[in-house]
Amino acid sequence: MTNFLRKYRPFVSAGIEEAIVYRANFLLFALGNTLGAFVTYFLWKAVFQSSTNSSLSGFTFPEMVLYIFLSFFTGILTSSDGSSSVGDEVKDGSIAMRILKPISFTANYFYEEIGSKLIDVGVLAVPLFGGILIYQIVGTGTPVLNLGNLLLYFFSATVAYLINFYFNICFSFTAFFFRNLWGSNVLKNALVIFMSGSLVPLAFFPPVLQNVLKVLPFSSLLYTPVMLYLGKYSMQQTISVLLLQIFWLIFFIFLAKIIWHFAIKHLSIQGG
Amino acid sequence: MSMIEVSNLTKDFRKTIKSPGLVGAFKSLIKPKYETFEAVKNLSFEVPKGEILGFIGANGAGKSTTIKMLTGILTPTSGYCRINDKIPQEDRQNYVKDIGVVFGQRTQLWWDLPLRETYSVLKEIYNVPDKNFYKRMDFLNEVLDLNDFITSPVRTLSLGQRMRADIAASLLHNPKVLFLDEPTIGLDVSVKDKIRHAIEQINQEEQTTIILTTHDLGDIELLCNRVFMIDHGQEVFDGTIKQLKNRFGHIREIEFELVNAEDANRLNFSQFGSAIEYSQNEKNVRVKFDSSKVSVPDVIRLTLSQVDVQDISVKDADIEDIVRRIFRKEAAEHD
């Protein structure tokens, strides 16, 4: 185990250093995303103002505000860039250099991403989560801050990140067959945003669709941790959504292994 | 026992055939047509431990495809290679521990980090003990002169520096087999020299088996005990550089820059017969001949006696020339 850590630790620090090299890029990314969250906020504000009900599909306006910013924060926390970077590397052939190293391909990506994620979350977590907490404390009619829910949230968000990482790795291996991932990546992102509840809470969908989406892995990526934080689940529901998350994590870990086994035989390095 | 054993190695690629133009692009989008392209056909050879093998051929001959199969990046369509007693495709992580690879067109260095960081990452990846690592770095510093730029981020390095850094990176873990795919491409003479010297020294001190692909005859002549030439994915020659030259002639090329372009009409090399041929482009006259049959001084003397010359340059034949000649010879034998 210590040997294992020693082998992959440099990737974490290399990931951190690379993230720092491109810090301007990252700050612009964070700014753009924050703007997006505010656009969503004003949209929902208009929706609630024009409605005669004070609660829509079980959400009061303060809960909705929390949902918007929390799902935005969770989106950053659990985002995984594996599919676009593997796609790029397959396209330009630089993936060859990774395959030539005596290390696990997946672990290599994972530790590099952990490095840059530490920076991302470190920079964003304090202002953003601070803002969420302040809103909860001073805002009127907001859900009460609950330590148990907070812990559940962080556990569930960590699992969500791992699911997302392996999901993206599985997805990225299709680049070995298609040679270029850009198109399918755009489609995938649109579907994930819709089905994970990051655009609209799943509770707003028709019951039939809701039931389907809640079982699919996408709800585990974002909806589950956010709803846990908001305390929307009973004890029994909490246990079942967490078990579902763990099931999907194991599923994607194995799927990644199986796809890798076949994909590596299909790889053709382009150029050079 | 051989370090590298290649047996009936074959690689087919499936290519989409696209008819020209926009209509063609749509056609191939809806109903793609495929064509099988044999990049490597039935290659077999062995390389004993400690040998430097020059692997040559024209562009698109299948050199890089072969190297990619040997290093385990590509899976052969049929046949196999066994290197250091391992099949690269079967046990990738274990196999790559003992090899070093440099692709002239790519880099294994961390693009955004100072060069030194790449080496410390590699040290951990390959689990190189501290003592060996420092000894190795000292040696590589000495032969490849890395010290001037070891603290610079890799993206700021020049091509020559990057290539030296890449070669050092491939040698840190003291590999048993080293694959160099065009390590001197685009480099100036002094950097080429350093790199050749380093390769030679590594080979002598560590008995490293090396496969080298190149277009530079200089690399081959200085480094390789043996040359393996392929074309259209097939073996066309396997032997020493001396045998290659004996068999296919010492082709030389001399370029004369004339004072007056019209003088070229007065040139007459008929006394040398078919061993010589020449072409003219305004003031420049290129004369190609077999130096085992016609001597360089004779050609120069004859030319100078016939026309006024401003400048003369003598060139060795490059690999492409030899390959082209092999084919002409084979074609002639078939007729």
Image (spheres, rainbow, N blue to C red):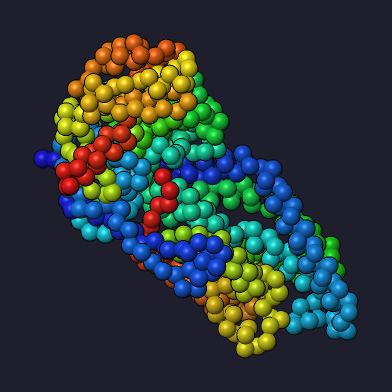
| Residue appearing at x 37%, y 25% in the figure | B286
| Residue B302 placement: quadrant | top left
| Residue appearing at x 64%, y 62% in the figure | A75
Q: Position of residue A130 (x, y in %)?
A: 75, 55
Q: Position of residue B215 (x, y in %)?
A: 34, 34
| Residue B15 placement: quadrant | bottom left
- Residue placed most toward the observer, B89 or A197: B89
| Residue appearing at x 16%, y 28% in the figure | B246
Residue A239 appears in the figure: no
Q: Position of residue B73 (x, y in %)?
A: 34, 51
Residue A236, compared with residue B156, is above or below; it is below
- Residue placed most toward the observer, A105 or A244: A105
- Residue placed most toward the observer, B154 or B226: B226
Figure label count:
0
Which quadrant of the rendered structure holds the C terminus of chain A?
Answer: top left
Residue lying farthest to the bottom in this orientation: A208
| Residue B40 in the figure: left or right of residue A113 | left
| Residue appearing at x 42%, y 12% in the figure | B308
Residue B334 appears in the figure: yes
| Residue A257 in the figure: left or right of residue B199 | right
| Residue B41 in the figure: left or right of residue B280 | left
Q: Position of residue A189 (x, y in %)?
A: 61, 66
Residue lying farthest to the left in this orientation: B1
| Residue B251 in the figure: left or right of residue A95 | left
